[in-house]
Structures are given as C-alpha cells and as structure tokens.
Amino acid sequence: MKAIVYEATGPSSVLKLQDKPLTAPGPGEVRVRLVVSGVNPTDWKSRSGSGSHTLDAPKVPNQDGAGVVDQLGPGVEGFAVGDRVWLWDVAWGGNEGTAQEYVVLPAHKVVALPDTESFDTGASLGIPALTAHRALTSSEDGPARLAPGALAGKTVLVTGGAGAVGHAAIQLARWAGATVITTVSGDRKAELASRAGAETVINYRQDDVVRAVKEAAADGVDVIVDVNAPANIEADLQVLKTGGTISIYAANPGESLNIPIRESMTRNVRYQFILTYTVTDGQKQQAVTAVGQALAAGALRVGEEHGLPLARFPLEETAAAHDAVEQGTIGKVVIDVAPAP
C-alpha cells in the first residue's frame, strides 16, 4: 500500500511516499481503508520536532481521517466490513497515522459515519471537534456532555471563529442551545463564521471587541473558547461573567500567558488549558459520544456553505498540505487518499 512516511523530524520535505506492507488487525483492532485524511496544526508541529534527528521508527503523519472498515480483528463487535467510519487520535502514541491507504487501530478509535455525511466531514472532526467539546464543557457547573439544550441560556464567546476548532465550537455550542459570539480578523472570515452559525461576529481589527461583546451580551459571557489567550486575556476578563471559564487550547512553542491575578480573583475565573490527547478517558468518551450525536443530527458540517472551506491535496502532496496548514490557510486542509466507494 502507499503511505507517507518520515524517518526524521524536520521540514515538510522529510515526508516521502513509500510502499508499505498491508498488515492484519489483531484482537480488538480494525483495519480501515482511508478515503480522506485531515491535517491539523499538531500534525506539522509533531513532524517538525525540535530539530532534525533520527526517530525510533518511521512514522506516518496525521491524526484524523475517514474511510471504510476493511477487516475486523478477533473480538471486535459493532462494525461490519464496508461500514463508513471516522477516526480520532490515530497517530497519538504510535507510528501509524492516516496519511496512508490503510491503517490498523483500536476499535474504540473508530466511530460510525452516517450515510448522510461526507468523508470530508468525518476527516474534519477528530482534533477540532473533540477539542471544542472539552472547551465547552470545562465550566464548574457545565454539562459533562453536550446535547440539545445542555447550554441553553448560556453565552459563549469563540475567538478565531473561522478556524477549525472555532468552527466546531460554534456549531456544537449552537446545537447545545447557547448564544454564540465570535471574533475574526476580516470580512472573509466573518462571512464564514456567520455561515457556521455565530449570531454576533466581531472584526477585532476594526471594532472595539469589549464594547461589541457587551452590546451583544450585557450580562457577560459564560465561556470563552480562546485560540490566542496572550493577546486576548485583558479583553476576556472584561467580558466574562463572574465564575466564568476561559478555555485555552492553542499556543506557540515556548509561549507564556501573563494572567492578571487580581482581576481573575475578582471574577472567580476558571482557566482550563486543553490538549485533547491527554484529557481523561471519561472526558474523551463523552466528547466522542456527543460529537457522534451532533453529527447524526446534521449539526456538524464542513464546506464553503457551512463556514469551513476545504483545501484538497492528493496523498503524494502531503508535504504541501502540511505547508498549507503551517501557513494559515483559511478552512480545513484535507488529503484525498483514495476514491470514495
């Protein structure tokens, strides 16, 4: 089978198209034929490493993907060959990612993809949607799992609403009944955030964010899903309700956050730092379940008309796909691994 492999960390040029042997699934495992692989910032960051050096074993990149069940290992129930599925955390803790024609992985990382949803949607869920779910359920008095009405009466501020996590946060928050405000950096992104479902969209390069948020939510916001806390912390504290939560899920290497202590104490702020790979098993399962239910309800959609345009690359151009994510391409970068059945 064809696979993208790297044997040393470094720039995208370390990614090479190779032939790999096809392996059979073991007990509790599923082999999936990939149709689409999704690319996230953590994919290129993991590949780049802290400098070029030899790895313990060759690695296939990318955590997210969607395809069809190809073979079941002993003891696997609930799936049949030919089932459409989406995958999460595929490369975490191992060497086999989704930038290859087939992947073998534990059955619990394989989730049914409704016939009404595209493989593109399935490959766009994993890291973005599971991160967004944790961000929206981090409040002390919030729900452990999102569902219709779970955030009724709540107001959520999503900074960077045109990004993949921001897009998923908008859609999940609206599905759960919240009022959603978002900030973006330009007109193009504002239109995308509106299509995703945000009711108030603020251009932070043109508008006074604090004033605009307070006009939309006079009593303040309950949860902030923040893509750039170092830049936003002062504004966040001015618009957050007492007892509110700031969920922080992104950072540049070596970046620090200077937290205004007194202002945070005054509002009894909860800060939740999030890395989806290392949340508890219970939190991850709640997220997977909720995302699956939102997907089945038609609440999670991708594509230009839904606010997350797709940038497509063939498997052999995975290096270019990684570069596109690193360079901040608007929307979701996906890799076409094989034709859909």
Image (spheres, rainbow, N blue to C red):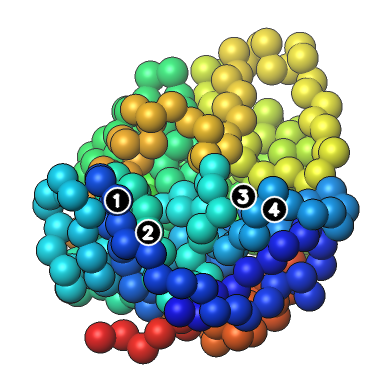
**Labelled pair 4, 3 in contact (Cβ < 8 Å):** no
Q: Residue 90 at what x, y percent from top left?
A: 46, 53
Q: Residues within 10 Å of mark 4 (few under 14, many from 20)?
A: few
Q: Which residue is mark 3?
A: 159
- The answer to the question of whether label 2 and label 1 lie on touching residues, with beta carbons closer than 8 A, is yes
Cα–Cα span, label 4 and label 3: 24 Å
Q: Nearer the viewer, mark 1 or mark 3?
A: 1
Q: Amino acid at mark 2?
A: Val
Q: Is residue 131 left or right of residue 295?
A: right
Q: In the rendered view, does 90 fall on the left or right side of 24?
A: right
Q: Is residue 263 visible?
A: yes
Question: In the displayed structure, would residue 83 be above or below residue 273?
Answer: below
Residue assigned mark 1: 26
Give the tally of numbered discs: 4
Q: Considering the numbered disc 2 on the image, is that residue within a helix, a strand or a loop? A: strand
Nearest to N terminus: mark 1 or mark 4: 1
Give neighbour class at mark 1: few <14, some 14-19, many 20+ (Cα, 10 Å).
some
Q: SS class of the residue under badge 4?
A: helix
List x then y, in percent, for residue 203.
67, 61
Q: Quadrant of residue 325?
A: bottom right
